[in-house]
Image (cartoon, grey):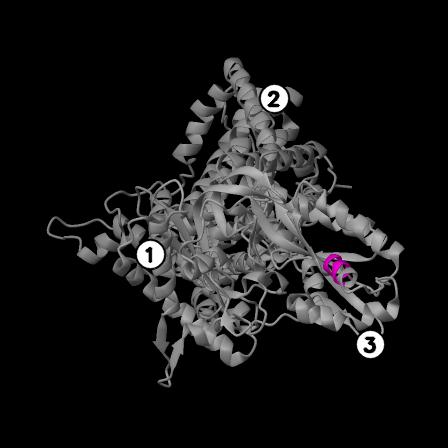
Amino acid sequence: MAAPSSGCFPMWCPSLRKVGLKPSKVVLEMEAGPGPDSERSGSQPPEGPDPEHVVASRQESESPLGSSQQPLPATESETQLLGGPRCHTNCLEAPLSRAFRRLGWEVGSHPWIFLLLPVILTAILGTGLIYLPEGKENLEEHYTPIGSPAKAERRFVQKHFIAKDHDHFSVSRQSTEASYASILVVSNSNSLLEQDVLSEISQLDEMVQALSLTNENGTQIHYQQVCSSNQGHCVPSNPLLFAWKRNSNLNLRNITFPIYTLGYQVLYLANLLGGTVLGDSVGRSQLLLEAKAMRLQYYLKTEDAGDNERSKAWLMHFLQEFGNMEKSLALKKIQVVFFTSLSRQLEFEATSRTVIPLFYMAYLLIVLFAITSCYRCDCARNQMWVAAFGVISVVLAVVSSFGLLLFIGVPFVTIVANSPFLVLGVGVDDMFIMISAWWKTSVTDSIRKRMSDVYSEAAVSITITTVTNVLAFYTGIMTSFRSVQYFCIYTGTTLFFCYLYNITCFGAFMALDSKRNVVCLHWLKKPETPDQKCSSLKKCCCFPYGSLPDEHQTGAHPVSLLFRDYFGPFLTNTVSKCFVVLTYVLYIVSGILGCFQVQEGLDLRNLASDDSYIAPYFNVEEENFSSYGPRVMVIITEPLDYWDKDARQKLENCLADFENSDYADKNLTEFWLRDYVQFMDSHHQDINNKNSFIHNIPSFESDFPLFMYDINITSDEIICSRAFIQTMGISSSTNKKLMLRQFRDLAEKCEIPLMVYNQAFIYFDQYAAILENTIQNVIVASAAMLIVSLLLIPHPLCCLWVTFSIASVIVGVTGFMAFWNVNLDSISMINLVICIGFSFDFSAHISYAFVSSPKPSVNQKTIEALYLLGYPVLQSAISTIIGVCALSAAKAYVFRTFFKIMLLVMVFGAAHGLIFIPVFLTFFF
């Protein structure tokens, strides 16, 4: 019984089709062994009947679509030519190939339908772009982990504690970030603790407090109307400056830090004075010898909607007028930088508008690259106009996908603006594959026949590539960062539309352009009389005009010949192999070392452009105010018998654990219960009696009004209360993560139910979540790629090298991120997911071409694999780099980082596919 001639070649055979190598030819070479010229790379197939022609001619005679119908059984002679019965490993490839052959025939038959339908669909879906947001983007929602512990802790604080901004204001007791304007003053001398320097600072402070504006309804908004207050007066911008303004004879040589007692008033100067030089200890503090910087903080009301709007208006006016104020003061003793609670949001929104001109640059570069890559010196095979339209089809895909997603309500966040650059580079790869397949067809065939051949050979390959890339992006939806989820949804969907438009409107345009080829061939073949001249239109349509192409020529691309004749032999040289191995060892060792140096988390200063006023503010703050961090709430979450001595002792033991931490200053702890014990002793009350304890709290709160915000009390019990721990030494992201983890562990270990919280923890949680999310996404995406490789590449050695390549590229990209000052954040996490898809494509193509090669030696197999697939891999890497290279000129970290990591991904991925894996395969095969 003769075996059928189809259903024998593995699924990844379409990869080889990029350069025109057909499955039947590979089967023949693999089974029949090397021909007489096998010692020379790129040898011709052995003489004799072509089994592909024998089988294909019988099949195509039955149907205009060739293999669109079920293939006929092979004859006995055909079976012998094919090497006898074979196993079926292409159960997916064969039906896909038949379906695409039929689709190609239909596209060639009705090109205008397949061209206009996607254009109409784009016009309809493009209307969704009217929903492109222009308003405020929620940084907390999009760039902090979903369901982070700090968000649950904040809900508890908001439910059980109150904090007012118009009476007894305290910033450390706020559950969310307060509304404020901040000025950092840096002295030009060694210290600002001088009369003339403080005088200049005082002038600046008075000018800020005198700032006012006229509202739209004509009413005046003064600072005194919007400022947060304490006992009826605006909260001082700096307590030390306020004390000096009230008493200019204040002894500046007798100030202590971080606690300064002035009469009966205690001033906490931590985070308000910076660049300090300290002397001898004085009680819980030290003598302040020098202070290089001072913080002026202007807090504003936000409790009701009216106050909130007026405060925003005043802050916007402050931002507009600060430069003029600085010029009018002509400051000589000090330098100033400024920031507001609105600045981060405003500057981040402004960065998205800066990349619009860069997209035009990227579009132009891709068009030029596509035209250059697809230009040929004869008019019948010159595809420069088709290449230009291929770039247009990518733009249509971007418009369609973005419009659709905006229409159904998927939020558009700033980092999604990176997506068109990536898609522009990746989307044209499928175009190159289809054009390459077109060049392999005969110019004498009908358009429908050529299109069916192109789709049969190329469409399956681009389907596989699209599946792997889209799958890699959609695995990113599992992350707990909404910004990453939205980016992956937009990019994955856009790549799908790129694929859809490639096999419809781009194929249709290719069919229409082939009609131009037919006309050009007719004109070139038609003999011209001496007095007949070519019209300008003819020269334009048949550019380059004047050469009659070889109608049966299907020569390889010159770059492929370079891989075969020069690069391949050079790479397989023994000396070159040793150098490659040494280079890889240096690469992987450097990558592993870099992995241990990567900083985690998104630095909030990087949300603004490089030339923003935010950058110098954070630089000054980091240089002068990095010693102290935020004041952390330690919350007793359940009712406790505070009047019980044992309970108080357990609580004190837990607080002592916090105070003894490396990240806490024990001298700055604030706890109402400790002051209440002293209050009860001074009033000769029994602290261990419940009634006495409960009934004296109102008197205590009248003497210490701030503590009323720390005690949630009913008539007979205290529901919950809180203390405050001053953190220190957490300027780096690593220390922030360690402090947060340590404090939560201490709270969990305490016998009394505790919780820790500060509004900054909302952003600190990303440091703990980013690594976990990255590892999770990489493992899931890698597992998905492994499953795909097992299904589509029926060779275990290929799957092994695909897995190795993915792991190696991820290690290299992650490690070299540290050397390029790129943090592991939500932006770089996206690129690591992308890295998996590209690593799969590069390694799978080359490794499968190697194991499929019929050459007798491993060196010849390597040269054959590079000859077949070196140019497509190189072309893919170059087009993607060109697509994102415009982002290198961006002034914002968000976009520039995307370029940096994509460059690493492409360079390392291509290096593995073209250098490392080909050499390693010669050792292990």
Asked if one can make out residue 65 in the rendered structure from this viewpoint, the answer is no
Please name the predominant secondary structure of the magenta segment in the image: helix
> In this rendering, does residue 884 appear at all?
yes
- Foreground: 317 or 467? 317
Find out whether the residues at labels 1 and 2 contact each other: C-beta distance under 8 Å. no
Magenta highlight range: 674-679
- In the picture of the structure, the residue carrying the numbered disc 1 is 516
Residue drawn at x 48%, y 46% is 274
Q: Position of residue 369 (x, y in %)?
A: 36, 45
Q: Where is residue 650 in the image (x, y as percent from the top left)?
A: 85, 52
- Mark earlier in primary sequence (3, 2): 3
Regarding mark 2 in the picture, which secondary structure is present there? helix
Identify the residue at image location x=57%, y=32%: 594
Quadrant, the C terminus:
top right
In-front residue for pair 621/611? 621
Q: Quick one: which residue is furthest to the bottom in this view?
A: 217
Q: In this view, does 254 lie above or below 812?
A: below
Crowding at dot 2, Cα within 10 Å, few <14 / some 14-19 / many 20+, comes out as: some
Which amino acid lies under the numbered mark 2 shown in the image of this protein?
Thr
Q: Mark 3 points at which residue?
A: 715
Give the CA separation, mark 3 to mark 2.
82 Å
- Is residue 632 a member of the stretch shown in magenta? no
3D distance between C-alphas at marks 3 and 1: 92 Å
Q: Which of 156 and 772 is in front in this view?
A: 156
- Under circle 3, the secondary element is loop
Q: What residue type is labelled 1?
A: Arg
Examine the image and state in which quarter residue 640 appears. bottom right
